[in-house]
Image (cartoon, coloured by chain):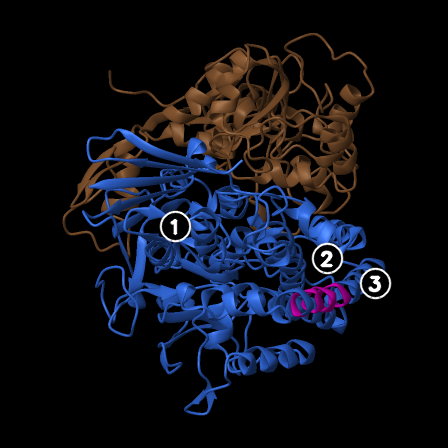
Chain colours: A blue, B brown
């Protein structure tokens, strides 16, 4: 049996590897997405004081430490059975909105966007942030840098540090703000709204109005009809910081809606010996292998799935874009709500709608009269929840859940982490396999394979094991085709 | 720039030098940076030894691949810099060295994790036979090592992550053609302690009792340690600007030990010992004083994990006792 190894160079650091096996006819027999990395947080957190979890677990990922910091802080609220005062929640969500603005910006312009903005068949040397800047103008590049800068400024102001914030406590937030700081947040939010609208215009002009890209966006190669997951507020609208977790089936019908505390009733995880990353699935449906459809317990958790589980957006401009988005894919309604979009490349578009929502939400928060209140902490009694503490937020890459158990002194005895990207482990494997099947026929590796397969996992925002952290530019690739005895028959590299 | 076992925060912090990125691009010929460039490991292998002027290496040594890359980049680099806490001293993932072995990790994560359905007790293996062939994974070492424990390191830049203004200061020194300090020096940080750059007032008060961060709202202007919060500032190198105390949270020690201090945890232990207020106990018999002091110290819930939060692999302890 022939075998194709696709090694992003990140394999060298142990981040992700694709193994494709071909049958005797030279067609794809199977494809595996391996994550050869483990750092063991679940184990070494045991014995640590519970209040350290927000600063320990944010070291899981330096790209999304804000997500880990807040999921851990919310798990501590639950563990210490303490409700934070409203101003603390406002400050946490403000920091989180700033984070979504910078993170989604980085992904769109530096990681995923180049496939569309400069195009999947452009020279690899152009398919990166600099290529994007050349296509849309230097002015756009400066806007991207400025957006990252002003939002990291807000993260540092509210969390203490630009990377790995420090202000989360059970029952609150250690930093209160005054009017001067509030004004900076308000101004930043306004600039973010302008930037998000600019980015949606870029997407409209360069992708939607280009027949080739537009067709690619709607192509079946990247289509997977799975269950979708996301956090919604009381009106079933997208929320990143708080709410209930809703799951809809491939037709958009709600099948689950639960409080984060109940996640283990609904989600189970599977272990495979060929990868360090586990495979979560819907317990109710069960693990039926790597397949789509309502019979398979595989689900997706991403910007696209968050829109798919929601009935609407909570802010006006984002709602306009939401309506346009579903209309562009046919606007079919099922039981009075929009049918989900299963074209996974549409995740990039969904991400920009979320960027606009995050910016608008940040402005709402900045204008809330309570945000400058000094009352940011409720002091816990010290009593520990015997059922453990569970906290959940939407990370940019999917629903993130932290689950801690502690003894009566507040020392951690057990930790379970279900991180954003892990939710999509099975989905990513399926997308990679589908792309491989489409581009490898009769033993011939089509030219577009490298980037088209890469696009299949990049659309999920490549943060494998929540420790893969590709920054501006390409994921370099080397495809090695070996025969059954392991001899290299062909090597294709992208330089 | 290369990353081994790390979180990506070092890359984000480097990117947070913002518009200076353009200056860096103009001044250097980037050769190898997996997150930025297409050059492959084979291109590095093809270089003559010493073919790279300077390499920033972040991340600890956790797998055989990390070790392989450390050795390769050492050979190819004229100057090798341990960039960030993981490469310099092991960082928070180095707390893993309190865990006896790989199997303990596998138990917690794969065999007995709540929510994992695993009746067969499957755990990741370096080789797995699937119907189509063999799949391989790199081995996971029993403990975390720093870059300097695997190869010779020329300079270290501390911090989790290093602060952007410090990163830029180091790069600018090189761009401007100024010579670097003697080999083995720490770059991008001061020589003193975080206390020296903290704006809180210290009055050299003794500590009557330790308190945990969630137990009370500290005074915003007074030294956190004097208020009973275990703040690592006096055992931690300056350079960050005293950021965590500015948001009313203790320094957690991410810049490592100050200049001339071999072991951050030992320094903290010694410092706390001299700060505990035994004045009110003096009239008691010696045995009772001991008991009182023990009770005060017992209020620090996890001294080892707190004092060595960032530096365990680099410390004199390095790891927990292992069965031979």
> Where, quadrant-wise, is the N terminus of chain B in this rendering?
top right
By secondary structure, the bulk of the magenta-drawn segment is best described as: helix
Q: Is residue B319 left or right of residue A104?
A: left
Element type at mark 3: helix
x and y percentages locating residue B263 in the rendered image? 55, 17
Is A44 a magenta residue?
no
Disc 3 residue crowd, few under 14, some 14–19, many 20+, Cα 10 Å: few
Magenta extent: A193-204
Residue projecting furthest to the bottom: A336
x and y percentages locating residue B104 in the rendered image? 27, 35
Q: Is residue B39 left or right of residue A143?
A: left
Residue A183 badge: 3
Q: Is residue A36 left or right of residue A381?
A: left
Residue linked to disc 1: A408
Residue linked to disc 2: A176
> Could you tell me how far apart the alpha carbons at marks 3 and 1 are, in whole angstroms?
42 Å
Read off the chain for label 2. A
């Amino acid at each position: 049996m022939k075998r194709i190894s696709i090694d992003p160079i990140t394999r060298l650091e142990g981040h992700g590897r694709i193994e494709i096996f071909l049958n005797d006819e030279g067609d794809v027999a199977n494809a595996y997405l391996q994550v050869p990395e483990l750092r063991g947080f679940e184990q070494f957190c045991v014995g640590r004081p519970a209040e350290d979890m927000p600063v320990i677990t944010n070291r899981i990922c330096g790209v999304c430490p804000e997500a880990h910091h807040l999921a851990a802080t919310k798990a501590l609220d639950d563990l210490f059975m303490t409700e934070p005062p409203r101003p603390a929640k406002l400050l946490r969500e403000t920091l989180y909105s700033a984070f979504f603005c910078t993170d989604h910006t980085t992904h769109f312009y530096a990681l995923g966007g180049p496939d569309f903005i400069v195009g999947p068949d452009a020279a690899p040397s152009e398919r990166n942030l600099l290529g994007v800047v050349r296509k849309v103008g230097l002015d756009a590049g400066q806007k991207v840098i400025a957006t990252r800068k002003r939002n990291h400024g807000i993260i540092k102001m509210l969390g203490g540090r630009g990377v790995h914030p420090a202000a989360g406590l059970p029952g609150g937030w250690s930093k209160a703000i005054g009017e001067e700081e509030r004004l900076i947040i308000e101004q930043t939010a306004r600039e973010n709204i302008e930037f998000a609208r600019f980015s949606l215009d870029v997407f409209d002009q360069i992708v939607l109005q280009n027949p080739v890209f537009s067709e690619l966006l709607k192509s079946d190669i990247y289509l997977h009809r799975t269950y979708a997951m996301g956090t919604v507020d009381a009106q079933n609208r997208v929320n990143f910081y708080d709410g209930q977790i809703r799951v809809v089936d491939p037709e958009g019908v709600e099948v689950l809606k639960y409080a984060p505390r109940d996640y283990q009733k609904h989600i189970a995880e599977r272990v495979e010996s060929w990868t360090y990353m586990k495979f979560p699935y819907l317990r109710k449906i069960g693990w039926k292998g790597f397949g789509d459809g309502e019979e398979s317990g595989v689900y997706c958790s991403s910007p696209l799935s968050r829109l798919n589980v929601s009935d609407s957006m909570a802010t006006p401009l984002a709602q306009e874009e939401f309506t346009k988005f579903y209309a562009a894919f046919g606007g079919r309604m099922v039981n009075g709500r929009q049918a989900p979009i299963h074209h996974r490349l549409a995740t990039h578009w969904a991400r920009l709608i979320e960027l606009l929502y995050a910016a608008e939400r940040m402005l709402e928060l900045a204008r809330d009269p309570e945000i400058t209140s000094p009352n940011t902490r409720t002091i816990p009694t010290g009593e520990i929840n015997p059922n453990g503490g569970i906290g959940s937020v939407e990370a940019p890459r999917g629903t993130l859940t932290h689950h801690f158990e502690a003894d009566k002194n507040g020392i951690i005895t057990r930790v379970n982490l279900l991180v954003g990207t892990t939710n999509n482990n099975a989905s990513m494997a399926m997308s990679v396999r589908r792309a491989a099947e489409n581009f490898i026929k009769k033993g011939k590796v089509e030219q577009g394979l490298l980037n088209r397969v890469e696009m299949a996992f990049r659309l999920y925002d490549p943060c494998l094991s929540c420790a893969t952290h590709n920054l501006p530019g390409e994921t370099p690739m080397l495809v090695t085709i070996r025969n059954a005895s392991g001899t290299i028959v062909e090597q294709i590299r992208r330089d | 720039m290369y990353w081994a076992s790390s979180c990506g925060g070092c890359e984000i912090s480097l990117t947070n030098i913002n518009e200076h990125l353009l200056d860096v691009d103009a001044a250097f010929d980037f050769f190898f940076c997996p997150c930025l460039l297409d050059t492959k490991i084979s291109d590095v292998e093809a270089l003559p030894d010493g073919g790279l002027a300077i390499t920033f290496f972040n991340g600890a040594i956790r797998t055989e691949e990390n070790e392989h890359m450390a050795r390769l980049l050492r050979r190819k680099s004229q100057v090798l810099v341990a960039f960030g806490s993981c490469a310099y001293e092991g960082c928070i993932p180095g707390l893993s060295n309190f865990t006896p072995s790989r199997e303990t990790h596998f138990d917690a994560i794969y065999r007995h994790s709540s929510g994992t359905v695993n009746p067969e007790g499957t755990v990741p293996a370096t080789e797995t036979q699937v119907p189509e062939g063999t799949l391989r994974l790199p081995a996971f070492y029993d403990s975390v090592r720093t870059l300097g424990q695997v190869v010779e390191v020329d300079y270290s830049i501390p911090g989790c992550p290093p602060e952007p203004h410090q990163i830029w200061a180091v790069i600018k020194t090189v761009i401007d053609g100024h010579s670097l300090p003697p080999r083995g020096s720490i770059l991008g940080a001061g020589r003193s302690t975080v206390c020296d750059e903290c704006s809180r007032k210290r009055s050299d008060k003794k500590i009557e009792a330790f308190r945990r961060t969630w137990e009370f709202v500290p005074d915003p202007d007074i030294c956190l340690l004097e208020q009973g919060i275990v703040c690592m500032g006096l055992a931690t190198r300056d350079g960050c600007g005293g950021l965590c105390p500015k948001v009313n949270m203790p320094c957690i020690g991410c810049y490592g030990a100050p200049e001339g201090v071999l072991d951050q945890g030992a320094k903290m232990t010694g410092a706390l010992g001299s700060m505990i207020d035994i004045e009110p106990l003096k009239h008691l018999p010696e045995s009772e004083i001991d008991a009182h002091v023990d009770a005060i110290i017992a209020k620090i819930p996890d001294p080892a994990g707190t004092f060595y939060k960032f530096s365990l692999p680099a410390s004199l302890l390095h790891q927990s006792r292992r069965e031979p």
